[in-house]
Image (spheres, helix red, strand yellow):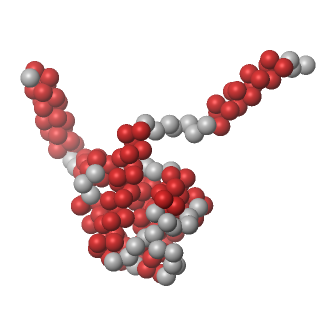
């Protein structure tokens, strides 16, 4: 028979496990918010579409799907945080809606070539730390091994020079 003390300890352990496993630092959350705001602004500038509008026309739905896709893939933002960002901008949105938008993006992209073009443009013009790191990662992944080795050499050399100063 389990004693009260053991029950309380088990309850504490369950509670610890139910908490979000990846706790973000305040700085990481701030970076995600800045990235999300930047992408929303860029979509509005390049398309004239406000992804936070309370309408469901095809163009809004498709660009909103692109927006969610970028937040997930590039920003590594959870569905719940995406929901919170939409709500903070006046759009009623649920995490399951974000999941639906994310899953449908490949289909939208297949039939609307503007989405793929805009995605490439947004990835190229992003200035936030998240966007820059993503772009650097893609450059490295698409490079030849000799280019990667040269990049690492230059990076390590720069680190050594900065430590001396």
Up the image or down, 1 lies above or below 88; here it is: above
Up the image or down, 100 lies above or below 144; here it is: below
Q: Position of residue 126 (x, y in %)?
A: 27, 58
Where residue 156 sits, quadrant-wise, is top left
Furthest residue to the bottom?
57
Closer to the camera in the image, 128 or 160: 128
Where residue 148 sits, quadrant-wise, is top left
Residue at the (51%, 38%) spot, across then down: 22
Furthest residue to the right?
1
Residue at the (68%, 32%) spot, across then down: 15
Q: Position of residue 161 (x, y in %)?
A: 10, 26
Question: Can residue 37 be seen from the camera position used here?
Answer: yes
Closer to the camera in the image, 149 or 7: 7
Question: Can residue 100 be seen from the camera position used here?
Answer: no
Up the image or down, 103 lies above or below 137; here it is: below
Q: Position of residue 19 (x, y in %)?
A: 61, 37
Q: Please state, as top left, top right, bottom left or bottom right, where the N terminus lies in the image.
A: top right
Q: Horizontal placement of 120 versus 62: left or right?
A: left
Residue at the (17%, 40%) spot, across then down: 151
Q: Please state, as top left, top right, bottom left or bottom right, where the C terminus lies in the image.
A: top left
Q: Position of residue 118 (x, y in %)?
A: 31, 70
Where residue 4 sits, quadrant-wise, is top right
Residue at the (41%, 39%) spot, across then down: 26
Q: Horizontal placement of 139 versus 84: left or right?
A: left
Give the number of callouts. Answer: 0
Q: Horizontal placement of 21 versus 52: left or right?
A: right
């Amino acid at each position: 028979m389990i004693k009260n003390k053991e029950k309380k300890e088990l309850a504490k352990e369950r509670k610890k496990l139910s908490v979000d496993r990846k706790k973000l630092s305040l700085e990481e959350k701030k970076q995600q918010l800045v990235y999300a705001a930047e992408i929303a602004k860029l979509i509005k500038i390049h398309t004239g579409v406000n992804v936070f509008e309370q309408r469901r026309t095809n163009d809004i739905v498709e660009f909103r799907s692109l927006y969610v896709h970028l937040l997930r893939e590039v920003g590594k933002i959870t569905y719940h945080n995406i929901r919170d960002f939409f709500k903070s901008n006046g759009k009623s949105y649920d995490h399951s809606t974000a999941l639906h938008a994310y899953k449908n993006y490949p289909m939208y992209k297949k039939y609307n070539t503007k989405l793929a073009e805009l995605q490439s443009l947004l990835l190229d013009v992003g200035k936030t730390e998240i966007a820059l790191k993503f772009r650097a990662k893609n450059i490295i992944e698409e490079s030849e091994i000799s280019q990667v080795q040269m990049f690492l050499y230059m990076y390590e050399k720069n680190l050594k020079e900065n430590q001396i100063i």
